[in-house]
């Protein structure tokens, strides 16, 4: 009896051992699983952090544009006017806002026309960003009286105005800003070591550049023929 | 010196084995760098005498350049800029004055001179320079613009105003007047802006676009009655012979915006009656749009009928044997059930041809 009991206790023990081992194994697997999943999450988060900041917005915009293209193609196949369709589906006030923003001037730079136009353009840019000091203005008007404040071309107001230090500072700052903006209009070209040397001198190089600027548009073909060695 | 006779007799006239190309010649010439002088040794200036020596040397170089080429403004400007950079204002001024003696019509010189004074906080000197520049070259808009801008920056608004007044005496182009008006508007002086507009129209009233702009300005600044007066004055100014359709169309559209539809109709009809045939195309377009938006069915129909009639009249006037045009015209009249007399007249005319 005791043998059976002891054998059963041994088998019990063995069974318990087995169970414990099984439990331990399952715990191990669970731990490994969790480790693996954690690691994957970490990698994923790292990747998300490294993406450029506007990735989401950009992707959405690209998708939207793709949809627009497809819809446009469909409309063209069916023979409808896509713009008209779109207008019918937008709300009225939003449509008005879009119209208004289009009507507002964009003012792109059209390149050099002549010095007067350039100065006028600069003047308009500077004055639209000018914010006049209305309080000082009305004070000055009170002090000076209307005769002097609204002069014609003959009234004598020379020498009546003594500018304050702060306004002179403002003038000087503005002049310097104009100078820095002027510098932006001419950039330094990089040195090209592979360019053909057709000069013997720095002065000669500049002169050749000038000639190229004026004559290249007419002599392209001839130059290419000479380079190749034979006419086309 | 003449070469010895032996050298003149070339025995072998075949090309040499080793040829040289033009590119190779140029490359070799450039690489020799014959004209590149080594830079002078760098000297540290330690006391006032050395400084004076250095400045004397630089001045001598500048004066030499000027002596070589007096009319090249860049020489003068570089000299004056250098004097400014060593804070010798009086010398810089004298350089500029000498340059102006050479060429007083050079705009860059005046601009550089005034800018130098402004940069060095010499406001009254700058004012003098600008005054002289503006007196000598009154048609250069840069001077006026920069002068008034300087006065505005200094917060001398009456001074800027006087500059503009002086400028307008020269009756400059439209854009100049526009800058003056924008200036007044910037300081919220709408009445003065109105005055300027009226003076502007005295000078530049021959272009109907300017009338339109003025009326737009009045409308936008909340005085539609003034805008109406402007339109009417514009119509008076041009009179019957020179009527311009843009003015009339703009007037009618203005009335539309003011919700005065009857007046708009009157204006359109006046335009149709008084303008020669070629210029009525736009009038018709806008009239039909207006009627479609605000008119009733009868109105729309009358407009369209009169438009078609004009078209047919034109076609018939060109070619009185254009049977298609005649038939279309007659059919149109019949469809719209016009007066019997008119239809009969039309038939008569067709037959008379």
Image (cartoon, coloured by chain):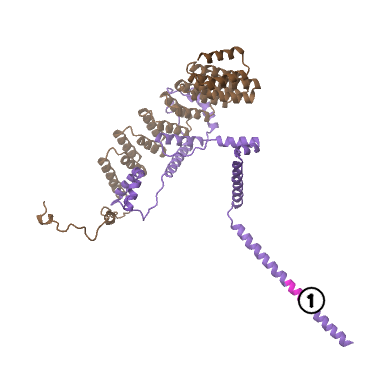
Residue A155 placed where, x, y %?
A: 44, 23
Please tell me which residue lies in front, A114 or B44: A114
Residue A187 placed where, x, y %?
A: 41, 47
Q: Main secondary structure of the magenta part?
A: helix
Query: Chain A appears in which tint?
Result: purple
Q: Return the residue found at the far left.
A: B5
Label 1: few (<14), some or many (≥20) within 10 Å? few
Please tell me which residue lies in front, B298 or B233: B298
**What is the tally of numbered marks visible in this picture?**
1
At x 56% / y 12%, what residue is drawn? B345
Q: Chain of mark 1?
A: A
From the viewer's perspective, tell me whether residue B280 is left or right of residue A9.
Answer: left
Residue B328 placed where, x, y %?
A: 57, 21
- Residue A121 versus residue B317 in the image, above or below: below
From the viewer's perspective, tell me whether residue B70 is left or right of residue A138.
Answer: left
Label the brown chain with its letter: B
Label 1 sits on residue: A19
B255 in the magenta segment: no
At x 21% / y 59%, what residue is drawn? B16
A22 in the magenta segment: yes
From the viewer's perspective, tell me whether residue B52 is left or right of residue A100.
Answer: left
Q: Return the residue found at the far right.
A: A1
Q: Secondary structure at mark 1?
A: helix
- Residue A154 versus residue A162 in the image, above or below: above
Q: Is residue A7 visible?
A: yes
Q: What range of the chain is rendered magenta?
A: A21-27
- Residue B198 versus residue B47 in the image, above or below: above
Residue A130 placed where, x, y %?
A: 51, 35
Q: Is residue B46 visible?
A: no
Name the quadrant of the N terminus of chain A.
Answer: bottom right
Image quadrant where residue A34 sits: bottom right
């Amino acid at each position: 009896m005791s043998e059976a009991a002891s054998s059963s206790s041994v088998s019990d023990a063995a069974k318990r051992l087995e169970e414990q081992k099984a439990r331990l194994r399952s715990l191990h697997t669970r731990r490994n699983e969790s480790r693996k999943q954690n690691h994957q999450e970490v990698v994923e988060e790292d990747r998300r952090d490294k993406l450029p900041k506007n990735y989401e917005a950009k992707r959405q915009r690209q998708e939207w544009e793709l949809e627009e293209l497809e819809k446009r193609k469909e409309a063209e196949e069916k023979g409808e006017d896509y713009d008209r369709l779109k207008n019918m589906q937008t709300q009225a006030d939003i449509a008005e806002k879009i119209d208004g923003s289009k009507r507002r001037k964009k003012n792109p730079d059209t390149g050099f026309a002549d010095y007067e136009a350039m100065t006028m353009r600069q003047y308009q840019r500077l004055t639209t960003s000018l914010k006049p000091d209305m309080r000082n203005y009305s004070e000055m008007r009170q002090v000076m009286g209307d005769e002097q404040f609204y002069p014609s071309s003959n009234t004598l107001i020379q020498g009546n105005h003594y500018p304050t230090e702060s306004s002179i500072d403002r003038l000087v700052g503005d002049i310097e800003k104009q100078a820095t903006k002027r510098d932006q209009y001419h950039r330094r070209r990089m040195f090209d070591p592979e360019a053909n040397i057709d000069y013997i001198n720095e002065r000669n190089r500049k002169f050749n550049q000038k000639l190229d600027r004026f004559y290249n548009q007419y002599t392209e073909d001839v130059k290419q023929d000479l380079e190749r060695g034979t006419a086309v | 010196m003449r070469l010895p006779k032996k050298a003149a007799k070339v025995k072998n006239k075949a090309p040499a084995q080793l040829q040289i190309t033009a590119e190779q010649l140029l490359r070799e010439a450039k690489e020799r760098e014959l004209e590149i002088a080594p830079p002078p040794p760098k000297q540290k200036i330690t006391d006032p005498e050395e400084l004076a020596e250095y400045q004397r040397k630089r001045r001598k170089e500048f004066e030499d350049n000027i002596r070589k080429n007096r009319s090249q403004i860049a020489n003068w400007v570089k000299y004056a800029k250098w004097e400014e950079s060593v804070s010798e204002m009086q010398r810089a001024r004298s350089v500029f004055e000498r340059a102006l003696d050479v060429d007083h019509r050079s705009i860059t010189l005046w601009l550089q001179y005034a800018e130098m004074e402004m940069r060095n906080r010499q406001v009254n000197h700058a004012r003098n320079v600008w005054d002289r520049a503006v007196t000598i070259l009154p048609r250069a808009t840069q001077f006026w613009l920069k002068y008034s801008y300087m006065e505005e920056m200094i917060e001398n608004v009456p001074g800027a105003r006087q500059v503009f007044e002086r400028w307008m005496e020269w009756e400059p182009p439209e854009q100049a007047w526009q800058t003056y008006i924008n200036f007044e508007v910037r300081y919220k002086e709408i009445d003065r802006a109105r005055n300027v507009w009226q003076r502007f129209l005295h000078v530049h009233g021959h272009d109907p676009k300017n009338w339109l702009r003025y009326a737009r300005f009045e409308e936008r600044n909340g005085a539609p009655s003034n805008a109406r007066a402007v339109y009417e004055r514009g119509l008076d100014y041009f009179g019957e012979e020179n009527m311009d359709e843009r003015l009339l169309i703009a007037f009618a559209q203005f009335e539309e915006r003011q919700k005065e539809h009857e007046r708009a109709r009157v204006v359109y009809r006046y335009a149709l009656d008084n303008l020669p045939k070629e210029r009525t195309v736009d009038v018709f377009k806008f009239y039909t749009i207006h009627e479609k938006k605000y008119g009733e069915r009868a109105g729309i129909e009358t407009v369209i009928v009169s438009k078609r009639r004009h078209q047919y009249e034109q076609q018939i006037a060109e070619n009185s044997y254009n049977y298609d045009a005649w038939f279309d015209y007659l059919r149109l009249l019949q469809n719209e059930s016009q007066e019997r007399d008119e239809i009969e007249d039309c038939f008569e005319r067709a037959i008379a041809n």
